[in-house]
Image (cartoon, helix red, strand yellow):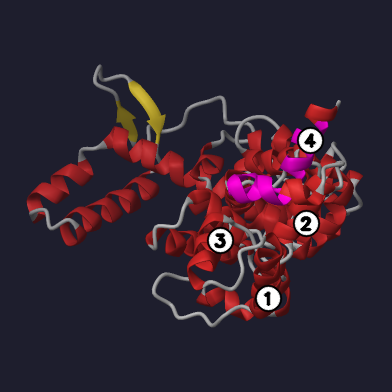
Amino acid sequence: MGSFHIAQRQNPRLYRTKRSVVTENCDGKEDARIPRATLKEAQAALFEYLHFTRNIQFMDAENMSKNSPHFLRKLLKRVKNLKDVGRVLCAFGIERNKIGQIYKKAVQVFQHEYGVLPLKLLAYQELGLSQSFMAKIIVCSPRALIGNVDMKFIKVLDILKSVGFDYAWIKEHLSEQDSYNWSMILRVLNIFSEVGCSCELHGLISQHPGLLFGGSGDGALSLIAFLLKFGLPVDQISSMFLQVPEIQVGQFVSNLIKCFLFLHEIEMEVDEIGKIVFLPHITWFMQENPQELGKWGIRTRVGPLPRDAESQRLKMKFFLDLGYGENPTMMKKAHKAFRGWGGELQERFDSIVNAGLDKEDVSEMVTSSPQILNQRKAVIQSKIDILVN
């Protein structure tokens, strides 16, 4: 574990010399002392800003710059704080050219009183986090230095360590161009646990680190909500993620939403959209042809998916077995009444027959009430179990 040294300022002199430039408050009492040279430099900078940048008249700008002691005192204190914090961060191992980036992400870090920041850095080191690791974290997520130790951040590290990720891996997958919300990342990890992904968490994150670190997991949360909204069983979410090609999670979510918008625009029912979006052969298609995902958008021409011919053949055979014949009118009626792809309808039909019913009785039942087979196989089986048991 690294360490660093910050030189402390000497104690202020306890006696007075010749009266220097002093700012005064409204009651005429002495306030904070400003050295004459520093005061003149600050007044000149303020005058230049007011006159040349804000286009205030010369006399007015000069008067304001020379008669604003309270403002100048606060401004100089802020500048001093910036320098103090910058020195501490540089001494800690952060490159000087990244100090401005930290300021943009969390200006509050530069408002700490002298001596506070080293204590905050030390608190993280005492938790076992190395100086080099924390230097990367501070650039990526400087808000960790605001308030007390960020326990959400520590909890995320604990979970990742528990499933086999070390600090080197975490450091490698953090981007200094991003800013991380550790509370949201922790929420994503907790949701993965709730939907049954705990056992596959290492493989899941290894394959898709963007689930956590892309937008602090915002895309993953949106995707999980989307999957659940359209009926994907909770226990299939992790396998769905593992089957998705190695593309950016944000891009995948975007493509999926575009697909939904397209199907919604052509007035497809929500339950039908869910069936299309999460069909196994479409998952296979995404694995084999990830570049085609980019074409899933409104008003974009997409060629027919592979395996459609086989799906149609199986569906036609199923209708013929039910007794619909080859009459175009009857076939059109069957296609409209029965919702499912390829062998799905046959599997649902067989699950009812396997429960002990006669095949001819089941054929008559589903012909008169096609909606029976418009349910997922698992739903049909659960209803049969309720009736039988």
From the top left corner, tell me how far across and down residue 88 is, in percent.
66, 48
Q: Earlier in the sequence, mark 4 or mark 2?
A: 2
Q: Which mark is residue 384?
A: 4
Q: 136 or 343: nearer the eye? A: 343
Secondary element type, mark 2: helix
From the top left corner, tell me how far across and down residue 53 is, in percent.
20, 60
Secondary element type, mark 4: helix
Secondary element type, mark 1: helix
Asked if one can make out residue 18 in the rendered structure from this viewpoint, the answer is yes
Asked if one can make out residue 122 in the rendered structure from this viewpoint, the answer is no
Give the tally of numbered discs. 4
Q: Earlier in the sequence, mark 4 or mark 3?
A: 3
Of the residues tagged 3 and 1, which is closer to the observer?
Answer: 3
Does residue 366 show up magenta in the picture? yes
The residue that disc 1 covers is 313
Dots 4, 2 in contact, CB < 8 A:
no
